[in-house]
Image (spheres, rainbow, N blue to C red):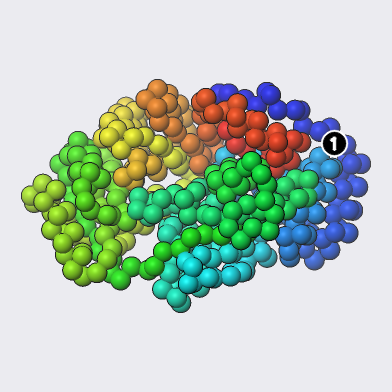
Amino acid sequence: MQNASEMPPPPSVTGADIAASWDELRAIAGAEHLHSAATGDSVAGVQPQAVFEPDSEKELAEVLRCADTAGLGVVPRGGGTKIGWGNPPVRANLILSTTRLNRVIEHAWADLTVSVESGCTIQKLQSTLARHGQRIAVDPLWPERATIGGILSTNDSGSLRIRYGALRDLVIGVTIALPDGTLASSGGKVVKNVAGYDLPKLSTGALGTLGVITRAVFRLHPLPRNTRSFTFAERDRDDTNRLILGILDSQLTPTGLQARCRPDAAPEVDIRLEGTDAGLAAQAETLRKLAAPGTEAPASETVWEARTELWSSAEQVAMAKFSVLPAAIAETCGCIGQLADSSGVQWRLVVQGTGLGSLRLEASNPSAIHEVLRALRLELETRGGSLAILHRPAALPVIDAWGSGGNAFPLMVSVKQQFDPRGTLNPGRFVGGI
């Protein structure tokens, strides 16, 4: 694994420094918004000392500045649905929660844009947008609890990505609080520009290591008039891959395309189409010509919950995200099955037509899961793919969450030094320990 050896060492913080910083934080935040952390506030097994829930962006930025000066480790948190993703932090003194920053600031429905605070849940935002027949075209995990800041930081777009693009394509502006207390904005609804950096794209997927997202502006899309899903049960993984590639190469415009694979059943391909009744009928006819005769199976909209279902009872399982080329989906599924079956590890996966997949591994012996993950990462990285481990059982031997940063890693270190030179935000949690 690469490491952040080029980063400056973390500041030396004494007990007296921390005690003094708490007094200053209380003066800024007020006792009602700063409280001691409970056991449930732990981050990947690391216990913080306090949780701060600011009422405003300015208050959040001021507390972040104070924490940075004191050398505290700060972990941004939204709904907490993905707080365990990434490596354990090397320091986690303060949880900076956005739960009170939950307003939909402006829905410019005529311009198909919305400005929203980062602590707003996806479900609340979608309900607000639906009043004008619009949506933000994402379907992340746990929308009733996941927040805007959380899905941006983890780049959790969901199955709609195949039609509308990733979150990087949908977010057109952000405001972030930098560790020095600056509130910097870039893109749509600009308050202050930061020349030279595309903050919306830099912040998306950065796991909160560059700044704390406080608000975002998104481009919107109309709600579909009708939605219809189809499922095809293929004979084997090669047929599954052929159908996926055929759909991608056709004139169809699916808003969802995924394959579900497990060792005890034939692979299934799910396709979601949206549009008018006439348009859906025409697309359905084209789709059936692409699929092999006799493979269409009963379909339901619930198939799009398959990725979420992989996380059910996830305490004793490992969950991973992998990335491969669409043409390599069958090969990758075969590799996963071979490695898992030979180690006595149960497995299930859901892979999108884009080549992004979610993998569940389960076994009574955590060491067997560890070996499968280690071998699979090596295979995928050799082929130009990647494997990120999102959740692991407590007994699993230590393994890095991210794997190689590749040729981009030196640039990632340089950007981190520019935005967070003291390593205050999520220290050690991201690629290579940055």
- Give the residue at x 40% y 27%: 384
On the rendered structure, is 198 left or right of 92? left
- Give the residue at x 27% y 31%: 331
What percent of the width, then of the height, locates residue 280? 21, 64
- In this view, the residue in front, 394 or 17, is 17
Q: The C terminus appears in which quarter of the rendering?
A: top right
Residue that protrudes farthest toward the bottom in the picture: 131
Other residues around mark 1 within 10 Å, as few (<14) / some (14–19) / many (≥20): few
Does residue 368 appear anywhere in the picture? no
- Give the residue at x 34% y 35%: 325
Taking 358 as reference, is 98 above or below it?
below
Image-quadrant location for residue 9 = top right
- In this view, the residue in front, 375 or 239, is 239
Q: Which residue is mark 1?
A: 13
What percent of the width, then of the height, locates residue 222? 39, 67
Taking 270 as reference, is 363 above or below it?
above
Taking 332 as reference, is 188 above or below it?
below
Helix, strand or loop at label 1? It is loop
